[in-house]
Amino acid sequence: MPLPHDFKSISPDLKQVEAYFREVFSRTTDIVFREFYLGDIRCLAIWIDGLTNIRISHDLFRALMLDVDPHSLRGVPPQERIKFINHHLLPFYATIQVEDLIELQRWIMLSKLVLLIDGCPMGLVLDAEATPIRSITEPVLESVVMGPRDAFVESMRVNTALIRSHLGDTRLKSELFIIGRRSTTAVTLMYIEDIANPDVIAEVRKRLAHIDIDAILGSSVIIDLIQDKPYSLFPLMKKTERPDKVVADLLEGRFAIITDNTPMVVTAPSVFVEFMQTAEDYYVNPIISGMIVLLRYMALVISTSFPAIYVAIAAYHAELIPIPLVFSVAGARETVPFPSFVEALLIMIIFELLVEAGIRLPRVVGGAVNIVGALILGQAAVQAGLVSPFLVIIIAATAISNFVLGSGYQLMQAVRVIRFVALVAAQVLGLYGITLVFLWLLIYMAGLSSFGVPYLYPLAPWNTKEIVNAITRPNWLYIDRRPDLIATGDKERNKSAEQEQMTTNSKVGPKTQEQQV
Amino acid sequence: MSLLMLTILSGDVFFMVQLTTRAVGQDAWITAQITSLWACLIIFIILGLGRLYPGKTLVEYIPLIIGRLPGRFLGMLYAVWFLLVTAMAVDSFGLFLNTTILTTTSPEVFVLSIMVLVFYALRSGLEVWARVNEILLPLVIAAILIVLCLALGVADFRRVLPVGEHSVGELLASSITPGSMRGLVLAAAMLIPALRDQKNLTRNLIGTVVGVGLILSLVNIMAVAVFGPENCSNLEFPFYNLARMIDMARIITRMELFIVLIWVFGVFIQICTLTYCSTMAAAQVAGVTKYQPLMFPIFVLITALATSGFQDVVQLRDFLESTWGGFGLLSFELTIPLLLYAAALLRKRHEVQKL
């Protein structure tokens, strides 16, 4: 689906078309014009060098120049030539006949091979695309222990193929959008027709169609352009590199946006609790993963508020510390020249610097950062009496908790901000200040929505069954319905529980001794 | 209607225990049940009025019942009443924190900080803070119940005996003041048109006040069981002190901070509801369709009233004990709506006869 533009017909005179393209692609060395003759009819192929599969284009020329009888086009009227070649002479599986010059030009830019024939007001687009792509590797951000290990790559087509291979449903629809006036980026919208909410799909279609930008540099640009609120502390659309996660989202009635040149697929509508789950949860024992999910919520609380609570207690509520501990805390803080707030702020900023350095540094020198962080900060700062060892422990706990949230990398970033806000509030108003910050966060989150779905769903609006699904992980037997607010179509997910009788009562396997007797 | 649950509960749980134990000693928990009756009466009246004038709020149908000019006047009184009640709630919140957990911080700081958040919440819309409430309500109730359970270790239930020492008259009289607090269920009259679930209104509202009544009875019983009726009526905030008494294995101590902080959530919802009612009432008396422009002036008024109201907790208690009953239940919450309902019924019958 090309961008809207005025129709421009292709002239039957090949010389004119060639002149047009030579003008458009002047001083463009990576465009190839290949001229050849089919009998005595002049033909022209145009493509971008390096983005076309050499073997396929080789096959094309072999077919047209060697295998075909040069006189086969003799009886065909000139305007039918492309159609005839397409239908009878070319052993190609993916072709499009195009009558619009601008569209033809755009197909060239989308790394297709275009064939033109003298006398025919039409062009033939051949899918000989061979964009340089990375091979499919293991996920970098969202690794699992037990579960599929494939991750998305930069090519949209490969990504959609990955999703398809996980989900062979005829009702899984994929719509193509070409976005970006200059970049002409291919963007695919995928959803399951009879599950997803048609209003949401219409809305996302509208928002995608309204994008008018010069270039799409990645899926994050799309998120910025279409999410419900331009500035939101919390992620309103989920980015993932795992096909199984996307398929799970599609099955819950969400849509997925696959952007070319990005290994991150975007899914929405998203709610808060989603970012607290990982793919792993669904591949291990439900009892254990239920506990791990709870652990993750604990980590969320720790990583947002631990330093703040330390500051609040040290500054306002010293009575909260048990008496035996009070002496050691006070003793440890004796040499520290700063108030606890400054102390905490200092360490937290340095910690953030370390994290950032760890991400940006080339892997070869990354080890150096660890040494600096562990030795100089952990060890020397305490020995020098700049910070108390308690604070170092607290910041370490915070950091570890933050990494536990790693699966929702987007959420982790929000948490980093909240931690500082809570710290300041704790210094100003003690534990009451932290309470106010949490209250503010709740109001803020309650006001957010992602494509019409309240962000705090299923907590508010309350839905008991969904909450159980979100904060524990039931056996698949009992995940039988899709989330109400997201999936409006087919809600039945799983009827295996009704068949349970069969599995529990069946007597398969070797008989025990009692049964034999 | 869980909005109203926190609205009522937050005021009751800290401020009413002392007053009722002072009046009827160990029978305070019976008072909490009698109070539910008052609240149910109010609910039936406002639901009856709501049925006669569907889709309209209290302030909107008053002029339809008693005529335009007197209606306007009474509506204005209600707007002012809501405003004063809100200011009282905010004021008592600031004073409470000032006397309990952050004694060196002046109450104005608490008033201002909570009002800023309330302003932010109301600006985001009714839906938003109603959702916040949905998350906070279980949290607050769970916290109260946890504290009550933990206090079992220091409780001696013989102190609750003898049951029913006081006469019915005494019990009724003692229920007037807490009845005014429970009577805040009147706010439903301003909220009903905005609700989605119109079918189960009666059930939900009654459930709300009865639920609060049960929790309060438990709080009263525990407070008396821990401190005994005499001590309980001398303590400023028995429930707060109850939380203080908790000592489980020397680890779970100082629960009073925990309960107060959770209570802040409840008060937040209370102030949101009451401020919303005052703003709506003011807007509808003035005949403005949108309440948003009035929000800022109302906020300034509430903050000003709240910061210049009571000097300290003693004044607040004095007000609650002597004036609040007459100001709440006996006038605006029960008597006036009752008269209105009677007038509305007469008027409806009159209209039917005319036809």
Image (tube, rainbow, N blue to C red):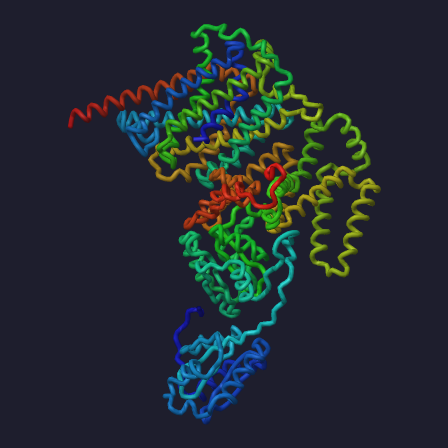
Is B338 located above or below residue A102 in the figure? above
Is B323 located above or below residue B186 in the figure? above
Q: Residue furthest right?
A: A383
Q: Look at the image and tell me in which quarter the C terminus of chain B lies.
A: top left
Percent from the top left, x then y, of residue A35?
51, 88
Q: How many marks?
A: 0
Percent from the top left, x then y, of residue B341?
30, 22
Q: Of residues B275 and A435, which is closer to you in this image? A: A435
Q: Of residues A472 and A417, which is closer to you in this image? A: A472
Q: Residue furthest left?
A: B355
Is A112 located above or below residue B201 in the figure? below
Percent from the top left, x then y, of residue B32?
48, 16
Residue ID at (71%, 41%): A397
Q: Residue furthest bottom?
A: A40
Q: Is residue A292 visible?
A: yes
Q: Look at the image and tell me in which quarter the N terminus of chain B lies.
A: top left
Q: Of residues A266 and B280, which is closer to you in this image? A: A266
Q: Is residue A413 visible?
A: no
B282 relative to A219 in the view: left or right: left
A303 relative to A95 in the view: left or right: right
Residue ID at (19%, 26%): B351
Is B331 located above or below residue A232 in the figure? above
Percent from the top left, x then y, of residue A412?
62, 48
